[in-house]
Image (cartoon, helix red, strand yellow):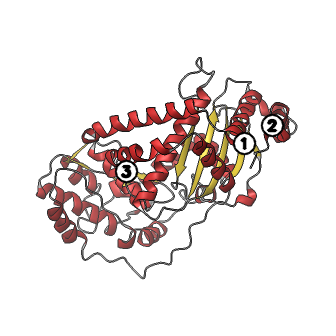
Amino acid sequence: MIEHLAFASSTRSAPDQIRRFRQVGFPLSLPSPAGGTTTWRESDYFVVSRTNQTADLDVLLGLYREVASELLFPAHIIDEQRDTVMREMADKRLGNDIHAGLIAAIAPGSPTDLIDAQNSDDVPTASPDAVRALYQRLYRPENTTIVIVGDVDPDEIATLIDAQFGDWQGEGPAPEHAPVPTFDSGRIAPVSHSALRYAREGATFSLTMPYEPLTSRASQAEADLLDLLMMRVINNRLATGREAYPAGSYGFFIENGANNFRFLVMWDDFVPGRWREAAANLVQTACDIGQTGFTEAEWAAAKQSLIAELEQRAGRANEAANFDLALQLANAATLDRDLLPPGEMLAVARSLLPGLDASEGRKWWLDQRAQGSRHLRVTSADLASQTNANAAIRKAINDAVPEEACQIPH
């Protein structure tokens, strides 16, 4: 709601100018992929300036200062934006419900589980006073990061920022920040399911573990490189025998910190009706990696292709859009991470990868399994006909991959 009001409301500096940000800022701006986004963790506002002229940048920074500290909350504008937000929530309800069910299964107790993405009980009834109180609690100097990327003089930009934001103080005493919750591993069951009729059918094998920012740039670079290498080698393993499958119907990815936990996910968007085979294949793949790891040929191919990708990214680094770099910098700052450029990652790869043999891949996987809570989730409308869907999934897995056959040797 506040994100919408930032573009629709007036401010104390111009109380009679409704949609002030749009009227003043948009003539100075190029279209950007997103004007504003909001997650449980943050709200981001994006502007792509038409020029790098000091006067234009100063106007845009002034508008940001107004959004951060001077928004007004006219009742008729709140009602107007309330209707818009409720329509957006209705459009996204099915997707949000599907995602909420997944997060509740793989990371119960995490922010994205505890916070109702729809906020359906609050938005229809929130008064101007309630919205204003939330704004004053969240929009404060200590919560704010300003990121500017482009052909500008850093000292000049620092002067502009200080002129616009240097005297900013939050309204009222600084609120106490409660600890951000993480997931409750004791509530993660081995298996869960969804039988939503209109959901995309698929199976996921996940490992969920605490997210802890690394303490040095070097350690982050090495950890990120290993993550990239493991994503490549596991995706290659999953691709074996799937030449007829469309791209993007299976894979493996790692997410670090965006939801306040780290999780690893292998997925298979199976052909309808084939949930048993898909679930068994994911469990078998996880089992095989833990038992025997990767062949030297698999490992060498993954290292070679990763180096090639990093070389390509480093060679095209200057082509990166300023908007994308600003977004990446903002996300890195939020997660207390360094943003490592492709050239630096390439240098680390050339130094580190030659000394890593295939046994390191298995060690990495076993370490993740030791830290993480395992979960298998199956989404299929066919499960609605099962008396006990979770028991049916467990039976399908055990029939194909008996537990005693998947003991991980020390």
Q: Viewed as shown, does residue 3 lie left or right of 87?
A: left
In the image, residue 364 lies at what x, y percent? 60, 48
Residue at image coords 69%, 61%? 184
| Label 3 Cα crowd, 10 Å radius (few <14 / some 14-19 / many 20+) | some
Q: Are marks 2 and 1 in contact (CB under 8 Å)?
A: yes
Q: Mark 2: which secondary structure?
A: helix
Image side of residue 397 versus residue 92, left or right: right
> Closer to the camera, 115 or 118?
115
Mark 3 and mark 1 lie on one chain; the one further toward the N terminus is 3
Check whether the beta carbons of the residues at disc 3 and disc 1 lie within 8 A of each other.
no
Q: Earlier in the sequence, mark 3 or mark 2?
A: 3
Residue 376: numbered disc: 1
The disc label shown at residue 393, or none? 2
In the shown orientation, is residue 246 left or right of residue 78? right
Residue corresponding to mark 3: 328
The CA span between labels 3 and 2 is 39 Å
Instruction: Please state the total of marks drawn on the protein image.
Output: 3
Residue 61, placed above or below residue 170: above
Q: Position of residue 50 (x, y in %)?
A: 18, 46
- Label 1 sits on what residue type? Leu
Residue occupying the far bottom of the picture: 173
State whether residue 301 is above or below residue 260: above
Q: Residue at x 70, y 24 (%)?
A: 272
